[in-house]
Every structure is written in C-alpha cells, then in structure tokens.
Amino acid sequence: MTPWFSGVETVQGATPEWAALPFAGVTLLGDIWVFVVALTLAYWFTGRSEIAALFGVVLTALSAGLVLKLLFGLPRPATGPAVPVEAVASIAQPFYEHETTARLPGLPSGHTLGATVTWGALAALLDVWSTERRFVMASVAVVLVGLSRIVLGVHYPIDVLAGALLGVAILAIALPACRRLDDPATPLLGSAVVLGALAVVVTGDTAAANATGAAIGGLLAWQLIEAPAPLAGSVADVTLAVCGLAGIIGLGVGLGVLVGSPVGPYLGTAVIDSGVLAFPVALSARGDRQPIA
C-alpha cells in the first residue's frame, strides 16, 4: 500500500471497540437526510432566500462529488470497519452494517463534502450565537464526520481531505452569490439541475437522479412562490414544522416508491424539495402571517 492510501489502519488501531457504534451515529451528520432537515428548519424559521439557495448549493456539491467519484475511480479501503459487525449489539447491527457498506468509488468522500458545504454555509449565513461559535461547531462536525468515515472503513484519509477541500472551494463560490444576489436561489438551484443531469449521464446512479429531481422540484417551486414569513419559535410552530416536514418527506418517499424506476427517484425528491420551499408560503396564505417585505 502506498503512502497516498495509508492512514486507515493507524486511525482504526487507535479506536476503542466501544466507540464504533457512536462513530456510526456521528457519520449521520454527513447524511443527505440530515442536511434536508437542517436546511428546511433553517429556511422555515428565517424565511430568507439565501437559506433557500443552500438547497441548490448542497445538491450541486453532492452531484459534483458523484461525478468525481466515477472519474477518479479510486478504490475504498479493503480493511473493513475498525470493529466488525458481529461485535456490535445485535439490535444495532443492521444500522452499523448499512453505515459500513458503500457502492461507489471512494474519492472524494461525499459525506465529508456534504458536511463541509452544509454546516459551513449555515455557519456563515445564520445569525444565531456568535460567528466564532458557529464556525467552531461546523468545523467539529466536519472533522467528526471525516474521522467516522475512516473508522468505519469506507474511506481513506485522502478521500476525506479531498471532500473537505472541494466543499471549501464550492463555498468560496456559492457564499458570495448568496450574499450579493437579490435572488440567489434561482441560479444556485439551476446549477444543481445542470450538475445533477451531468451526474445522471456520467454515473447512472439513483443518488444522481435523486439530486436532479430535488433540484428541478425546488427550482420550479421557487419560481411560483414569494419569500415567506418565518415561523415563530413557539411550541405550536415547532410542532407544525416537525409534522409538516415528516408529511412532506413521507409523501415524497411514498410517491417515489409507488411510481418506481425510472421516474420515481426524480419524482419523489422533486415533491420533497418543492414541498419544503412551498410549505411556509402556504401557511402565510392562511392570512395569519404576512410575507416578508
């Protein structure tokens, strides 16, 4: 094994057996569904178009990562996870096995790429806490996700580093657009459609179809709505947000499964992204909230 692909055994050798399952949980901070929940809640409770634009940024990043995986075609580690599936509690084995299994080539790490873009962008654009605290939390999340991918045996350190660097490069382009454009969501969702279509052609993977469908649905919905009034932080609005998001995801996933391939992967995520962007606007239309000026 060349130094270029070294480092997995060192990290795994320093990982105690009890930490294996927690690392499988930590890796969810780089999962697309966690990104969807985080971006949705940030958008719903701020009503800001630059937060809506982050859906396009994240989808663009994930599609770019898929294309690069196939173009580089570099293998994943052959070592397996630091702790074998059989050593984990039986009730957690299906989850642990899922998180230690991967299909596509390794470089760059999609989880690290997505975590860098999502948590980095939210740290830059949200107004909660201090800027330093937001970026420290985002950095910790990215480091933990990258480390978890090595511990779980699905990436080399170079894969993780490449994912983080690509994420920083994408943020360097996307964040100025989010801050300066009057309507950043339209071009950034549009770029996600283009990159998603390219990823479908290059990879033919379901994940690429999912990203493309989400970008198309989000872009179409954004052309039909106005910036909504943000939800308040009341218990009622938080409950409404949780139920609404669960309903939107359930509807999208259900339609995708019902329709099946080849249309289902596009339709399901299109329904989810369009529903996420339109949901707070529908609430504003009830008359008890006024749109942001």
Image (spheres, grey):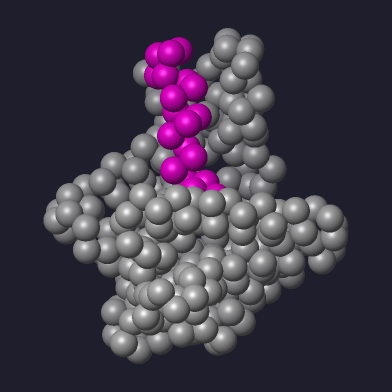
Residue 204 image point, x, y percent = 76, 61
Tell me where residue 182 sits by quadrant: bottom left
Magenta span contains residue 33 = yes
192 or 168, which lies in front? 192
Tell me where residue 180 sits by quadrant: bottom left
Q: For the point 44% across and 28% down, which residue is it?
A: 23
Q: Is residue 259 visible?
A: yes
Q: Magenta stretch: give its range.
A: 15-35
Q: For the point 47% across and 56% down, which residue is it?
A: 241
Residue 47 image point, x, y percent = 37, 72
3 or 275, which lies in front? 275
Image vertical order of residue 230 relative to residue 250, above or below:
below
Image vertical order of residue 195 relative to residue 69, above or below:
below
Q: For the point 27% across and 58% down, which residue is it?
A: 123
Magenta span contains residue 255 = no
Count of residue discs: 0
Residue 181 image point, x, y percent = 34, 87
Q: Is 286 displayed left or right of 197 in the figure?
A: left
75 or 136, which lies in front? 136
Q: Is residue 5 visible?
A: no
Residue 59 image point, x, y percent = 54, 65
Q: For the point 59% across and 20% down, which residue is it?
A: 92
SS assignment for the magenta stretch, majority? helix
Image vertical order of residue 141 relative to residue 134, above or below:
above
